[in-house]
Amino acid sequence: MKTIHVGTGVPYDVLIGRGLMDEAGTQLRNVLRPGTDLAEKPCLAAIISDTHVGPLYGARIKASLEAAGFSCVSYEFKAGEASKNLTTYTDLLHFLAQAHVTRSDVIVALGGGVCGDMAGFAAATYLRGIPFLQIPTSLLAMVDSSVGGKTAVDLPEGKNLVGAFHQPCLVLCDPDVLDTLPEAVFRDGSAEVIKYGMLGNEAFFEDLARTPIRDQVEHVIETCVAMKRDVVEADEFDFGERRKLNLGHSFGHAIEKCSAYGISHGLAVAAGMAIMTRAAVTKGICRPEALPKLLSVLEQYQLPCGTDFSVSELAAAALSDKKMGSGKISLIVPETIGRCRILPVPAGELGSWLCAGGVK
Ligand code: GLY
């Protein structure tokens, strides 16, 4: 098992290892109640999951938690990004209140990015904040969204527009669960993995081109989590360097929104990275040889390199993104493989970036 310590204001560990799902109870007890008997000081674990993941792993996690002395209640919401909204969030709060969850209890987010974001936001706000454990079950959630404390739900106006920073008390990544992940969901996570190589690690990027992610999945998770840890420790609240983790996201979020979330996050981020890199080459910011390398890796992982949405559709959607401030939008622009910069661009110039990125 590998432990990556995240030294944020409220510090915690990310544990990566096969079989960790069955250790959830003991690992959580070690963090929440070290050296105490849960029979003397009871703790209720509210397991939050969706209709895909709950039936697969809910019983296993519950058994592990109960064996370690936790009492459990479970809540499932309909799987999919469309559920990541204020209605599901409010239903979840009612569930927690009716189950009498207190500040000495814990939320367990068991699922992919949607589950972690929403259960994390409930944990951040219910009773002004209670602890939560992240058990990511998708590649995307393991390498990115479960680490760093960003929690949120979407509004009709845009993605993640209501949220809070709330670090988990522990993250458990069990790569065994990825063996049963549908190929399309695994592919979605591959886009976020490639993003890490593209934004800050050329050797890792080359590695992904040589060896399929599935054949080196533990190394991939460790590398991405360690990179994210370094960024988040330096800029926990996203005022500077952390924004580089949004490479591909300004246009990616716009693509997701234009598709009414029919296009998944990873596919949208892949297309967003390709558009941005093409534009950066056209504008003389990125080395030209970076573009064919990126496109070739995206194709290798069967990820899209563009979109059918129009410049005006995407520009309108991107302008509602929260990366917008004082009439400017912060674009994350590649300079080469393994290096990017944050570039504030006036809102009126967004169309020219999309055109330069090959959008019609
Ligand atoms: N997923 C981007 C971040 O955590 O900042």
Image: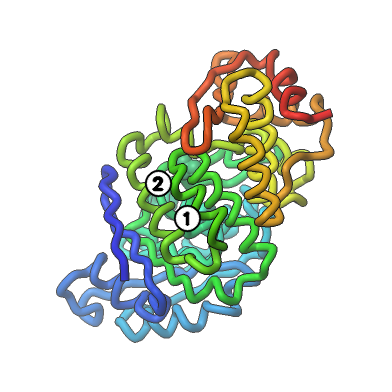
Asked if ligand 1 lies within 8 A of label 1, the reply is no
Asked if ligand 1 lies within 8 A of label 2, the reply is yes
Residue 90: where, in percent of width, then height? 58, 53
Q: Secondary structure at mark 1?
A: helix
Q: What residue do we see at 39% from left, 58% from top? A: 222
CB-based contact (under 8 Å), mark 1 and mark 2:
yes
Give the quadrant of residue 326.
top right
Circle 1 residues within 10 Å: few <14, some 14–19, many ≥20: many
Quadrant where the C terminus sits is: top right
Residue tagged 2: 228
Give the quadrant of residue 315.
top right
Is there any visible trace of residue 108 in the rendered image? no
Q: Earlier in the sequence, mark 1 or mark 2?
A: 1
Q: What residue do we see at 64% from left, 31% from top? A: 276
Q: Is residue 284 above or below residue 307?
A: above
Q: Is 276 positioned to the left or the right of 57 in the image?
A: right
Residue 143: mark in rendering = 1
